[in-house]
Image: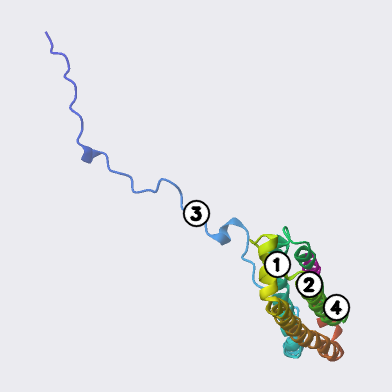
């Protein structure tokens, strides 16, 4: 009787060489897919154009500085306007001042945009805007002086009418003169600061006019297009 064929023993692992081929084919070179690399084209501006553009940027420095001043003025006015409006929830005069400052901030934005677009109306708008701000602050300070002179005891919160009247009687001259000194100083400082700033803006008109007159039109159009 013949013996049943025995099961063959498993071959050792060395009989199955591990393939060294990668699991995925390597990416094809860029040129092999039929799309040639794009080489940078020549500049549309000649060397003369680039020189004119560089010279124009130098002549525009004073105008660019005015744009920076208007930008800082815009943000400062907007911040103080928000604070004043928040305080105006309990004081009508402060609310009106805050709304006026909001209008000043909006005009500062308009004037800044006009300067960026080389609009000759920009310096005048920014200058008169500073005078408007000085007028609004002076009106608020003047109203505060009037209220202090009319009813000094009203400036003593936390006291009843009798105690406030007694304190006002004892310190009447101080309660009358101190607001005049404080708010008067505010009015003077405001007109000095805003007046000088207004003069600065008004003087930018001639610099902007000179820049427009000495710069080629194609540069004007390019700069205005960048601000569109």
The tag earlier along the polypeptide, 3 or 2, is 3
Q: Pointer 1: what residue?
A: 165
Extent of the magenta region: 99-106
The tag earlier along the polypeptide, 2 or 4, is 4
Q: Pointer 4: what residue?
A: 125
Q: Nearer the viewer, mark 3 or mark 1?
A: 1
The tag earlier along the polypeptide, 3 or 1, is 3
- Marks 3 and 1, Cα distance to the nearest angstrom? 92 Å
**Who's the residue at 68% across and 65% down the image?**
164
Where residue 161 appears, as percent x and y from the top left, is 70, 61
Where residue 1 appears, as percent x and y from the top left, is 11, 8
> Can the viewer see residue 168?
yes
Q: Pointer 2: what residue?
A: 140
The tag earlier along the polypeptide, 3 or 4, is 3
- Marks 3 and 2, Cα distance to the nearest angstrom? 74 Å
- The residue tagged with tag 3: helix, strand or loop? loop
Name the quadrant containing residue 207: bottom right
Q: Nearer the viewer, mark 2 or mark 4?
A: 2
């Amino acid at each position: 009787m013949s013996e049943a064929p025995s099961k063959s023993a498993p071959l050792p692992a060395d009989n199955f060489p591990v393939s060294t081929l990668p699991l995925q084919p390597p990416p094809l070179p860029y040129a092999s897919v039929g799309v040639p690399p794009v080489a940078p084209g020549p500049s549309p501006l000649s060397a003369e154009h680039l020189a004119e553009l560089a010279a124009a940027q130098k002549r525009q420095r004073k105008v660019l500085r005015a744009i920076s001043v208007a930008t800082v003025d815009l943000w400062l006015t907007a911040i103080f306007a928000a604070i004043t409006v928040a305080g105006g929830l309990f004081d009508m005069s402060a609310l009106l001042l805050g709304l006026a400052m909001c209008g000043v901030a909006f005009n500062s934005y308009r004037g800044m945009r006009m300067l960026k677009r080389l609009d000759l109306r920009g310096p005048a708008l920014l200058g008169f805007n500073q005078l408007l701000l000085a007028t609004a602050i002076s009106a608020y300070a003047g109203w505060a002086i009037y209220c202090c002179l009319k009813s000094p005891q009203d400036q003593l919160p936390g006291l009843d009418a009798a105690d406030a009247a007694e304190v006002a009687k004892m310190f009447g001259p101080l309660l009358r003169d101190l607001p005049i000194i404080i708010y008067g100083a505010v009015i003077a400082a405001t007109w000095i600061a805003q007046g000088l700033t207004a003069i600065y803006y008004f003087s930018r008109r001639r610099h902007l006019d000179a820049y427009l007159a000495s710069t080629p039109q194609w540069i004007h159009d390019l700069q205005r297009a960048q601000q569109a």
